[in-house]
Amino acid sequence: KNVLVLHGPNLNLLGQREPDIYGATTLNDINAYLTQQAEAADCQLTTLQSNAETALIEAIHNARTSVDFIIINPAAFTHTSVALRDALAAVAIPFIEVHLSNVHRRETFRHHSYFSDLAVGVICGLGAQGYELALQAAISHLNKG
Ligand code: DQA
């Protein structure tokens, strides 16, 4: 089974970026951990971080024929991108939406997501652990289906 993990804008700065909100764990740490977790479950994991909407949309289009499940933190695009939402709807690959911070206890503009109503599930506020839990849920979703 193939799982694609997509990280949106500014997440390349994890570890340095507002660590009180996003934690001290770097994106490399997160990806390395997820890769191990996937290997242990006989899954193939691909990760991509981009600050550009285009790259994320194209990765979703390319996933159409090869990817069974997507884990995505759309970052700021969560609150703005109809285009990224439409890409996920177009390929119809099941996905889990992850946020490091609890967006619901932050500014009101972070309370709305263009993704949540299409997602299998949403995890927020658990920091880097949210990705581990999402991958665990993705794997059990795939083993069921
Ligand atoms: C985020 C929350 C978003 O509101 C913000 O724009 C991000 C990161 C999170 O992981 O908590 O860049 O998606």
Image (cartoon, rainbow, N blue to C red):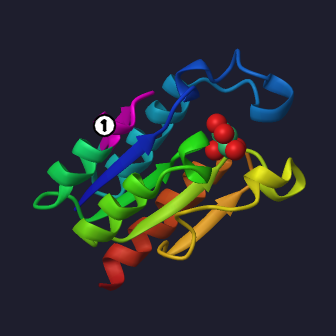
Q: Check the image and report above or below for 137 versus 13.
A: below
Residue type at mark 1 is Thr
Give the residue pinned by disc 1.
54
Q: Is residue 52 magenta?
A: yes
* Residue 143 x, y percent position in the rendering: 33, 77
For residue 131, side relative to residue 104 (left or right):
left
For residue 51, side relative to residue 107 (left or right):
left
Q: Check the image and report above or below for 80 versus 26.
A: below
Q: Check the image and report above or below for 49 versus 71.
A: above
Rendering quarter of residue 113: bottom right
Q: Is residue 86 visible?
A: yes
Q: Is residue 125 visible?
A: no
* Residue 116 x, y percent position in the rendering: 57, 69
| Residue in the image at 57% along x and 26% along y | 10
* Residue 59 x, y percent position in the rendering: 25, 44
For residue 104, side relative to residue 77 (left or right):
right
Q: Is residue 4 magenta?
A: no
The crowd level at tag 1 (other Cα within 10 Å; few <14, some 14-19, many 20+) is: few
Part of the protein shown in magenta: 46-56
